[in-house]
Amino acid sequence: MKRFDERYILLRAMVSDDYYPNFLVEKVEETILPVIRMLEAGETDLDVIQDKLDEMTLAINELEAEFEDHDSELETVARESIAETVEYILEWFQIDIDTETAIRERDW
């Protein structure tokens, strides 16, 4: 079982931008962590992985109103940061799912 790169900063652009409230960035991160844990456990079935990615993306969609309530939104920087993080995770674990497919359920 391969461990995730502990040096990688999830959602780097969002973390470093004051436009995004820290507690909400942490909530987005909390939706991503179960995907990482599943891959660390050795899951390789692409259908199972995509289902987990869909679940993650739908959970991020649910946070959109909360971002807006705090004068923020899941806009370009956030979209790119989330996509970049997902892409890195997929590459790290050598999962053959395109990033756009991985986050296909997004509303942002």
Image (spheres, rainbow, N blue to C red):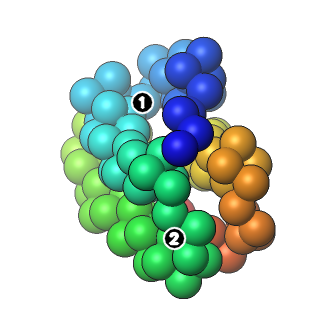
Q: Residue at x 50, y 63 (%)?
A: 43
Q: Residue at x 32, y 63 (%)?
A: 59
Q: Position of residue 73 (x, y in %)?
A: 43, 47
Is 16 on the left-hand or right-hand side of 95?
left
The three-letter code of the residue at mark 2 reads Ile
Q: Nearer the viewer, mark 2 or mark 1?
A: 2
Q: Nearer the viewer, residue 27 or 20?
A: 27
Q: Which residue is mark 1?
A: 20
Rendered image quadrant of residue 95:
bottom right
> Relative to 19, does residue 60 appear above or below in the rendering?
below
The CA span between labels 2 and 1 is 28 Å
Q: Nearer the viewer, residue 75 or 38?
A: 38
Q: Residue at x 33, y 23 (%)?
A: 22
Q: Position of residue 33 (x, y in %)?
A: 38, 44
Q: Position of residue 44 (x, y in %)?
A: 58, 67
Asked if disc 2 and disc 1 are in contact, CB closer than 8 Å, the reply is no
Q: Residues within 10 Å of mark 2 (few under 14, many from 20)?
A: some
Q: Secondary structure at mark 1?
A: loop
Q: Any mark on residue 49, and which?
A: 2
Which residue occupies the extreme bottom position in the image?
A: 47
Report the label total: 2
Q: Nearer the viewer, residue 46 or 57?
A: 46
The three-letter code of the residue at mark 1 reads Tyr
Rendered image quadrant of residue 9:
top right
